[in-house]
Image: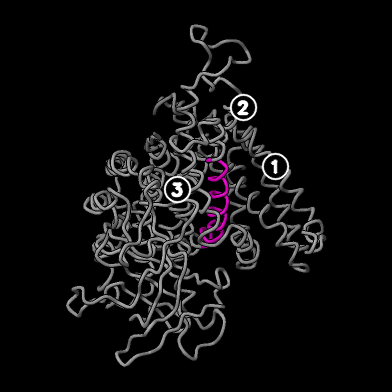
């Protein structure tokens, strides 16, 4: 039976020392977020995820969801766990207080999200999607729409979904066929079929608020003619009470590789009553509000599954006796040594650890950019934070989810044959992890977004600001004896990234295949440089705290040891990635299609 321990100590280190959240109390969400309150939230989140969500993860995955008499039933115990979650006020934690939210920072919200996903990915998706839907309504909805939907969604009484994909189109939404016909009531009749709708139907809430992309009759073809609609599962009366069932139904549940405890639905819309949100034919712009937040959340899913998989792999490695250490028996009084003494097992565990702790710092930084972009009174600060977050979002989504799969696979490998047996939990971790590089925009699309849209943004100003952020840290610390080793390696990696960027500017403009063939490598190169920056920052704070006699010395020394592994074993991959980029598209594109 797998287990889970929430990484509260690591988050306290990041929140109180590395990023010093208390210094952001000029932003409204941070005014009440004192260190004591943050610690209390983290501790309560740990109790919820360890004691309520995690015990249902394996059983929920084995049981899965069922479609009976037109209604989706979630696994045993999920309804009770969900009720405990909403009764604890977790759903509205980062929501607008005007509509019942608590108004706390996204920096806290994403930390809790990691814990929820690690403990039970399938269950966490139901409330997770609701947050994105609520944010979209909050940004683009009318006052009436906000007042109608947000209080119930913030409380968790109602949930929400995102409906994009159709049987004949995924990423290319310009091919969308779902229709919207204006009716005599000022609303629209929505008809069509949507597939792969996570949490599309279930028994956890009284109502489900679907956000649906559709084309109004007479609208232009392609993405320029797509609008966004609010389509509730149950119609809502003028007094706010629930009325009759709307014309939306679950036609089937997808049989899939993982996340079996979350209902992935085919939804049929048959003259369902829908309400336009935002402007006509501007639905893609509104939907990207939800998608961008969702992409950060999916990146966190990659981190979360890596964390829980590695925890269980490390626990197994400490207990499993197999062979003797290469340097001689470490436990001569036992029949064999635990496998954690073997360098190859250590290599896998350390790779996972270096990724998860570096990724966690990156997530915390991204969450801060989100909070600054929304709440800083200075417009220039808001714009810079929004630009930097926009630049980093495709990288966070893609790199973290790819590495989440790799980390789950390495964790399974640590268990040997037992890892391949369901009861140990590793098969579920790996199967669940595999969806994250696919949904919310495949990772190939993320890489192309980074290359094609984000790098040229504002004539390259944003990427130059990114380079300057890292270079400034290097310049400030290169003469610091405690950090010079790290800043030297980081500077060389940054130079490789800058060289690769120049190569793209010189080659990809004239030949788009050069961008397409190298985008994946470029994104990973940027991710490693970014992670190196955050690791160097964590080393600086760890050494300062040790010198001052602050904090847990063992924790801080472990942090530095893990940083050493990252800089000496993972950051050097930036060299090979640069060479792969400069190899260009020729070898990728030369083979005839028929030869495949």
Disc 1, SS? helix
Q: Position of residue 203 (x, y in %)?
A: 28, 60
Q: Which residue is mark 2?
A: 344
Marks 1 and 2, the one that precedes in the sequence: 2
Front residue of 478/261: it is 261
Q: Of marks 3 and 2, which one's residue comes earlier in the chain?
A: 2
Is any atom of residue 111 visible in this view?
no
Q: In front of the other: label 3 or label 1?
A: 3
Question: Is 130 above or below relative to 405?
Answer: below
399 falls in the magenta region: yes
Asked where in the image residue 264 lies, by quadrant, the reply is bottom left
Where is mark 3, residue-wise? Answer: 364
Q: Position of residue 535 (x, y in %)?
A: 54, 39
Q: Is residue 293 above or below residue 213?
A: above
Which of the marked residues, 3 or 1, is nearer the chain's N terminus? 3
Where disc 2 sits, the SS reads: helix
Residue 492's label in the rendered image is: 1
Residue stretch in magenta: 387-408
């Amino acid at each position: 039976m797998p287990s889970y321990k929430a990484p509260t100590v690591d988050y306290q280190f990041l929140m109180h020392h590395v990023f010093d959240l208390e210094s952001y109390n000029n932003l409204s969400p941070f005014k009440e977020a004192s260190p004591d309150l943050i610690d209390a939230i983290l501790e309560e989140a740990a109790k919820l995820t360890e004691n309520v969500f995690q015990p249902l993860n394996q059983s929920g995955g084995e049981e899965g969801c069922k479609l009976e008499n037109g209604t989706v039933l979630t696994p045993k115990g999920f309804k009770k766990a969900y009720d405990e979650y909403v009764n604890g006020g977790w759903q509205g934690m980062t929501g607008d207080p005007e509509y019942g939210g608590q108004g706390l920072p996204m920096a806290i919200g994403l930390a809790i999200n990691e814990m929820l996903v690690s403990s039970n990915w399938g269950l966490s998706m139901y409330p997770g999607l609701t947050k994105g839907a609520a944010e979209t309504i909050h940004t683009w909805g009318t006052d009436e729409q906000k007042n109608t939907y947000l209080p119930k969604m913030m409380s968790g009484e109602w949930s929400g979904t995102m409906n994009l994909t159709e049987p004949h189109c995924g990423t290319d939404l310009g091919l969308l066929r779902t229709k919207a016909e204006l009716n005599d009531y000022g609303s629209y009749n929505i008809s069509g079929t949507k597939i792969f709708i996570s949490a599309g139907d279930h028994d956890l809430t009284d109502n489900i608020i679907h956000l649906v992309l559709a084309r109004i009759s007479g609208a232009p073809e392609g993405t320029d003619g797509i609008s966004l609609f609010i389509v509730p599962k149950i119609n809502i009366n003028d007094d706010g009470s629930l009325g009759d069932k709307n014309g939306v139904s679950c036609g089937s549940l997808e049989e899939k590789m993982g996340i079996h405890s979350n209902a992935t639905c085919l939804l049929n819309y048959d003259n369902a009553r829908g309400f336009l949100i935002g402007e006509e034919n501007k639905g893609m712009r509104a939907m990207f509000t939800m998608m961008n937040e969702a992409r950060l959340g999916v990146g966190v899913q990659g981190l979360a599954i890596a964390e829980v998989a590695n925890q269980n792999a490390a626990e197994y490695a400490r207990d499993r006796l197999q062979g003797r250490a290469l340097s001689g028996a470490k436990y001569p009084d036992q029949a064999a040594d635990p496998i954690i003494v073997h360098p190859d097992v250590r290599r896998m565990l350390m790779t996972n650890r270096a990724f998860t702790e570096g990724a966690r710092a990156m997530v915390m930084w991204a969450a801060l950019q989100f909070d600054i972009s929304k709440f800083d009174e200075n417009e220039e600060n808001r714009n810079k934070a929004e630009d930097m977050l926009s630049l980093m979002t495709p990288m966070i989504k893609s790199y973290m989810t790819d590495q989440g799969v790799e980390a789950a696979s390495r964790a399974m490998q640590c268990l040997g044959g037992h890892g391949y047996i369901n009861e140990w939990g590793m098969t579920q971790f790996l199967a669940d992890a595999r969806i994250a590089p696919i949904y919310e925009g495949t990772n190939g699309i993320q890489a192309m977004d980074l290359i094609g849209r984000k790098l040229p943004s504002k004539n390259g100003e944003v990427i130059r600001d990114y380079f300057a952020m890292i270079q400034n840290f290097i310049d400030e610390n290169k003469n610091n004896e405690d950090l010079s080793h790290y800043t030297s390696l980081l500077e060389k990696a940054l130079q490789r990234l800058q060289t690769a960027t120049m190569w793209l500017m010189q080659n990809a403009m004239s030949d788009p295949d050069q961008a397409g063939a190298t985008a994946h490598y470029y994104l990973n190169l940027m991710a490693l440089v970014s992670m190196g920056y955050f690791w160097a920052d964590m080393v600086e704070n760890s050494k300062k705290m040790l010198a001052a006699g602050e904090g847990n010395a063992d924790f801080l020394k472990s942090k530095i040891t893990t940083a050493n592994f990252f800089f000496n074993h993972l950051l050097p991959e930036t060299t090979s990635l640069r060479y792969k980029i400069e190899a260009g598209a020729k070898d990728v594109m030369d083979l005839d299609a028929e030869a495949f």
